[in-house]
């Protein structure tokens, strides 16, 4: 039971780091659930997987990560905006590589819910997400 409480606390803290705060997630219709986190084979790096669920019309604002991201669309249609590039639209089964530090945003561009599995290879000990100005 003690382990479960500790794991739950860690998951809640991590979720708040990803979205800036819990209120942001509730207001925007986005839910982020950390699936796993492990040390990577490269010293000082870790790999983190997060399921991100978007309600109809929900979008995540411009942000960056301290490492690479691979976004895999599980459900629906997603539109990604990477600074300096044309918008990229993906459907379930498509994936996108986002280089470390690239400012980007994501939007549910379909009529229903959309979900992605985001895999990050990030610097250990750094916040996994930083909102852009």
Image (cartoon, rainbow, N blue to C red):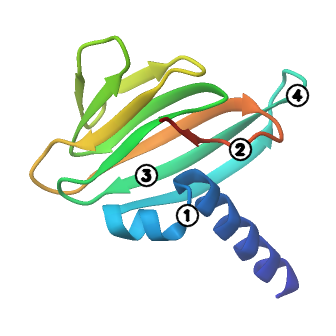
Q: Is residue 82 left or right of residue 11?
A: left
Give the residue furthest to the bottom: 1
Q: Nearer the viewer, residue 55 or 133?
A: 133
Percent x, y of residue 126: 77, 39
* Structural distance between the alpha carbons of marks 3 and 4: 25 Å
For disc 2, the marked residue is: 127
Q: Nearer the viewer, mark 3 or mark 2?
A: 2
* Structural distance between the alpha carbons of marks 1 and 4: 26 Å
Give the residue furthest to the right: 43
Earlier sequence position, callout 1 versus callout 2? 1
For disc 1, the marked residue is: 21
Q: Is residue 31 left or right of residue 4?
A: left
* Structural distance between the alpha carbons of marks 1 and 3: 15 Å
Q: Identify which residue is drawn at 77% across, 80% down.
A: 4
Give the residue furthest to the front: 133
Question: Can see residue 94?
Answer: no
In the rendered view, would you say 9 is above or below 99? Answer: below
For disc 4, the marked residue is: 44
Earlier sequence position, callout 2 versus callout 4? 4
Q: Identify which residue is drawn at 35% across, 11% down.
A: 84
Q: Identify which residue is drawn at 39% across, 70% down.
A: 26
Q: Identify which residue is drawn at 31% across, 26% down.
A: 81
């Amino acid at each position: 039971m003690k382990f479960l409480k500790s794991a739950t606390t860690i998951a809640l803290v991590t979720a708040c780091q990803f979205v800036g705060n819990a209120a942001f997630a509730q207001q925007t219709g986005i839910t982020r659930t950390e699936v796993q986190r492990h040390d990577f084979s490269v010293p000082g790096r870790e790999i983190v997987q997060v399921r991100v669920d978007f309600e109809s019309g929900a979008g995540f604002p411009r942000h960056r990560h301290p490492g690479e991201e691979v976004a895999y669309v599980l459900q629906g249609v997603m539109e990604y905006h990477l600074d300096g590039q044309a918008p990229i639209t993906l459907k379930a089964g498509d994936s996108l590589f986002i280089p470390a530090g690239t400012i980007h945003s994501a939007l549910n561009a379909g009529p229903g819910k959309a979900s992605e599995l985001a895999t990050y290879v990030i610097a250990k000990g750094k916040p996994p997400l930083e909102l852009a100005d």
